[in-house]
Every structure is written in structure tokens, then in C-alpha cells.
Amino acid sequence: MKKKIFSGVQPTGNLHLGNYLGAIKNFVNFQNQENTECIYCVVDLHAITTKQDPQELKSNVRDTVAAFIASGLNQKKSIIFNQSAVSAHSECAWVLGCSSRMGWLNRMTQFKEKAGKDKEKASIGLYVYPILMAADILLYNSTHVPVGEDQKQHLELTRDIAQKFNIDFEAKNFFILPEPIIQKDFSRIMSLKDGTKKMSKSDPSDLSRINLTDSNDEISIKIKKAKTDSHPLPDEKNGLAKRPEAKNLIGIFSSLNNQDVDKTLNEFSGKNFSDLKIKLTELIIEKISPISSEIKKLKMDENLIDEILNKGALKADEIASKKIKELKKIVGF
Ligand code: TYM
């Protein structure tokens, strides 16, 4: 059976190493597999669940596409488009919202984290965000969804929503229940300043993350300043259990070098963080600087980016509007 891959990335500022290792690198792997159809979406409807400057949003959408292409996505192999260009996403989200239950949404940890203490002031959009995400995935009959660990709960909810709709409307298998694809060891890249916190675009400290557009000097400074502990590096995985910063830096090294954690530990066991940091800096620069210079080049060519988006939107719309037509029939519209 053909694999149908769908995933999305929010255009809310610089993409970072967490987005790359947790998601985008995997997008590229799927794109190069046989019998696999890939759709990657810049989710601008999701972005406006928190306040965005309209001009900045437009430019962030283009920057995200530039990062996709610079990381190895190819518009001839994958459909690349922005969510707001395909109206089926909003339509489907409304219908799915009517199958979803408040209790399900109330359990979403990402809403709790993003809304913070004063959740009365959060937008309704932020609250129903996971329903829109379910619509994104289900519209394309996606079978697999590559994401970082932080999206796991949203994927479980997507399956619940799909199942409830199929049962409520006696539409067996209308929505396909998608499988999340979450990498074993590298699905949660942590902040460089605190190994217990996720690396995130919204962290106020830029030192907490490596952006895909960082210069070599910035990378070098950030790794030099990354938090460590005072013990030498262990010789086996168990030794990383209570050492979040060591675990994170070893994980980043392993993922970038496409090797498992045991192999990296063999290389660094008994050594100090300073040794790891030197090699890690070299490796990040080797892997990220070609991406970063390609992003800069692509950003100068807005027409090219817009053309990729327009062509992608036409292809996505063709698939999604068919599904919406069937959906409307089932619902009785
Ligand atoms: P977003 O934009 O926050 O992140 C994009 C992708 O990057 C992953 N990611 C990470 N992975 C590992 N370590 C990290 N520190 C890290 N930070 C981010 C995320 O897990 C994600 O895979 N709701 C989604 C976007 C979305 C979507 C979808 C995804 C909308 N519709 C449909 C899949 C399918 C989000 O906000 O991702």
C-alpha cells in the first residue's frame, strides 16, 4: 500500500535544530522513499492562534518554505503549500469540531503550556487548534505523520476524532486513522540553557537554540555557553538518565551524525564536555551552514518561493476538495 505522509510546520519565526532533527530531516527521508506520497504544509492558520504581524507572517511563510527547500525538500517530489491557500482545511475543521468533545481538548497539554496561567485570555483558536490539525491530516487520507514528541498527544486526538466521526456517521474507514512517526532517541531536542525544557522558537533566550540561519560564530558561541554538568561523559545510555544536558548534547551529536547514541558514547566516554563541545560545534557547522547559506539565497528569490507555494496549493486543493465533497455528502449538506 502506498504510504501517504503529511506534516506541518508553523511559520512563527526562525526554525531551529529541534524542528530540523525532530521533523524536517525525517520529511526529507520520506520524500526519497519509494511508494510514498508526501505533503508538507506551512500552517499559517495555526500561526494566527497567537497574535501575528501580517507582514511578518507573510515573510515567515516564505522563510519556512526556504528552510524546507534548503533542508532537501523538493517540490517535484513533495507537495509544499500553505494552509490558508486551501479552504478545505477550515471547512473540515468546523465539521470535526462538532464531533470533538470539550473533555478531549481540556486534556491537551500544549494548550495548557501555551495559554499559561491566564487561560481565560487565550484565543478560542488556540483552544481548538488540535481540531484544525486533525483536519489537516485527515483531509489527505494520510497514513503516517512524522512529528516531534511534543505533537504525540495531538496525533492521538486526531485518531479519536476520526474514529468518532466514522462511527457517528456510519462511514466506516472514511477518515483513515494515521500513525504518528516519532523518532526513538531524537524526538525531543532540549534547550541549550536547560536540558529539561524543549528547544523552542518562543524561548526568550536566543542562546537556548540553534537557528537554521545562525552563522558559524553564533553556533560556536551558543555551544560554548550551553549548560553542562561537572562529570565526565558516561560510557553507556543509563549514565545519561539523570543528566539532561549531557543527554541532549549527545543526542544532537548522534542525530546529526546519523548514528545511535551508543556509538557516540563510545567515542566520548570518560571525556569532558569541552571535548564533546569542540566536536559538536564542528559537526553542527558542517551540517547547518550549507542549509543556512541556501536559506539566505532562496530568501532573495520571493518569486520562486511564491511559485512553489502556488503550484503546491493547486495540487493540495485538488485532493482536499474531493474529500470535502464526500464529507459534505456524508454530513447531509
Ligand atoms: P511546530 O511548528 O511547533 O513544529 C514543527 C515540527 O517540529 C517539531 N519540533 C521538535 N522536535 C524535536 N525537538 C524539539 N525541540 C522540537 N520543537 C518542534 C514538532 O514536533 C513538529 O513536528 N502543531 C504543529 C504543526 C502542525 C502539524 C499539523 C504537524 C499543524 N498541523 C499536521 C503535523 C500534522 C506544530 O505546532 O509544530
Image (spheres, rainbow, N blue to C red):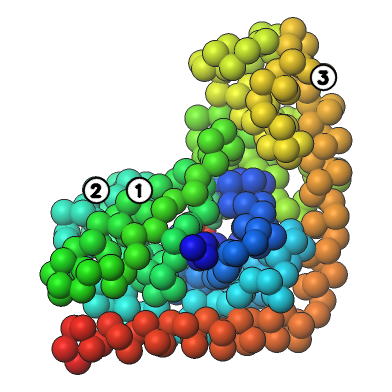
- Mark 3 vs 2: CB contact within 8 A: no
- Mark 3 Cα-neighbour bin, 10 Å: few <14, some 14–19, many ≥20: few
Q: Mark on residue 107?
A: 2
Q: Is residue 50 visible?
A: no
Q: Earlier in the sequence, mark 3 or mark 2?
A: 2
Residue type at numbered disc 1: Gln
The residue at the far bottom in this view is 333
Q: Is residue 55 above or below residue 245?
A: below
Is residue 83 or residue 197 the one in the foreground? 83
Q: Secondary structure at mark 1?
A: helix
User: What amino acid is found at the position of numbered circle 3 in the picture?
Assistant: Asp
| Quarter in which the C terminus is drawn | bottom left
Q: Quadrant of residue 12?
A: bottom right
Neighbor class of circle 2 (other Cα within 10 Å; few <14, some 14-19, many 20+) is few
Name which residue type carries label 2. Answer: Arg
- Identify the disc placed on residue 275: 3
Q: Which residue is mark 1?
A: 153
**Residue beneath the point at 52% across and 54% down:** 146
